[in-house]
Image (tube, grey):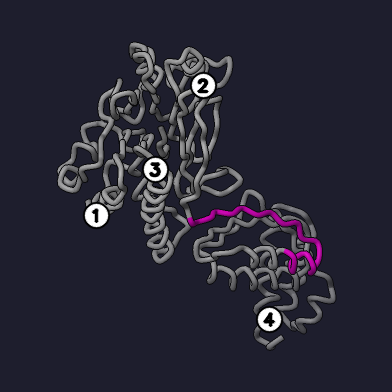
Amino acid sequence: MRFVHTADWQSGMTRHFLDADAQARFTDARLDAISRLGAVAAEQEAEFVVVCGDVFEDNRLAPAVIARSLDRIAAIGCPVYLLPGNHDPLDAASIYTSEVFARHRPANVIVLDAPGVHEVRPGVELLAAPWFSKHPTGDPLTEAVAAAAPPAAGVIRIAVGHGGTLPVGAQDQRLIDVAALSARIAAGELHYVALGDRHSVTEVAPGIWYSGAPEVTNFDHKETGSGSVLVVEIPEQGPARVTPARVGSWRFASREFTLTAERDVDAAVAALSALPDKDRTVVKAGFTGTVGLAAKARLDAELEALRARFAALELWERKTDLAVLPGEEELESLELTGPAADAAQELLGVARSGGERAADASGALALLYRLTRQEVGA
């Protein structure tokens, strides 16, 4: 028996660093990931797809977002089970009970709207744990598993949950108890645990997996393996076999560079320029070290040019500590006179002081250098 495990589609998600054009392309890509997921299900002859929470970004979405997502699901050639999560819980404002959802709901969509056992077909069942609020007092999955009677002999049971997991030795009734789930797997009462909430593909324990999000949602220093779904095979004997399948097309890349000379600027620009699919790539770049005015001016100009090519390129403020210490010859090359020369010397003194205003003074000098060089056509 084979199925596709996915989660955290968060249809309707927006990212603050994307402009209107890039956001529109990102939105389309998230819908396209649903279609590619359907293709994976068909290729792998999956019996069904289970979406483990956060199908939608929020319960307050435009009708078009809901309708378009359901249209993509309708094209998937097998049943699709949707589990409400913390972003789209079954509360009074739930999407799943809304008029727009009812109007556009395709025949292959089954909402796991009640905790407990849901039969897929004779011999296969889902043990579901939907969320009824954004902040439940206990973990819905732990509670659902504890309340369920063991499956009949020969029945495959898959637990479907959403939320964070309980660290070893910790106690928090709001988190999923992995040890308890592992004990159920060892006893043959569960054959696989499909989880959502963590956007990185993660094997928490044997037979217990987060599928990750089908399209990237965060930078790669925080999120790994996103952009995939899991193809899960439950054999007649032995543990579940899990294979990730790529369905996403975007990339959020974080990069750090140490700069001490012009050649380091060249290397940083080359590394960023080498990233593929720039229209589907968001970059967060951090720079540390010490450079002169010319190197800083060139870095600024190159980054400005690259911004036009990437979906977004932003400075990684937390990882940036770049000092600009101009040499006397760099200031002399500007041939400043009068008040401009006096101001430049004053800024140079502040920049070299290492005081609270040193960074601002360095930035002002770099801007002065760049503008002056442009004015003289250098």
Q: Specify whether residue 128 is in view.
A: no
Above or below, comparing residue 287 to residue 152 in the picture: below
Residue 339 percent across, percent down from the top left: 70, 79
Label 3 – label 2 distance at C-alpha: 34 Å
Q: Which residues are magenta?
A: 249-267
Residue 3 percent across, percent down from the top left: 40, 37
Q: For residue 256: magenta?
A: yes
The answer to whether the residue labelled 3 contacts the one labelled 1, judged by CB atoms less than 8 Å apart, is no
Q: State the residue position of label 1.
A: 64
Viewer-side label of 3, 2: 3
Q: State the residue position of label 2.
A: 166
Label 4 – label 3 distance at C-alpha: 65 Å
Q: Upstream in the sequence, badge 4 or badge 2?
A: 2
Q: Amino acid at mark 1?
A: Ala
Viewer-side label of 3, 1: 3
Viewer-side label of 4, 3: 3
Q: Amino acid at mark 2?
A: Leu
The answer to whether the residue labelled 2 contacts the one labelled 1, judged by CB atoms less than 8 Å apart, is no
Q: Residue furthest front?
A: 236
Q: State the residue position of label 3.
A: 45
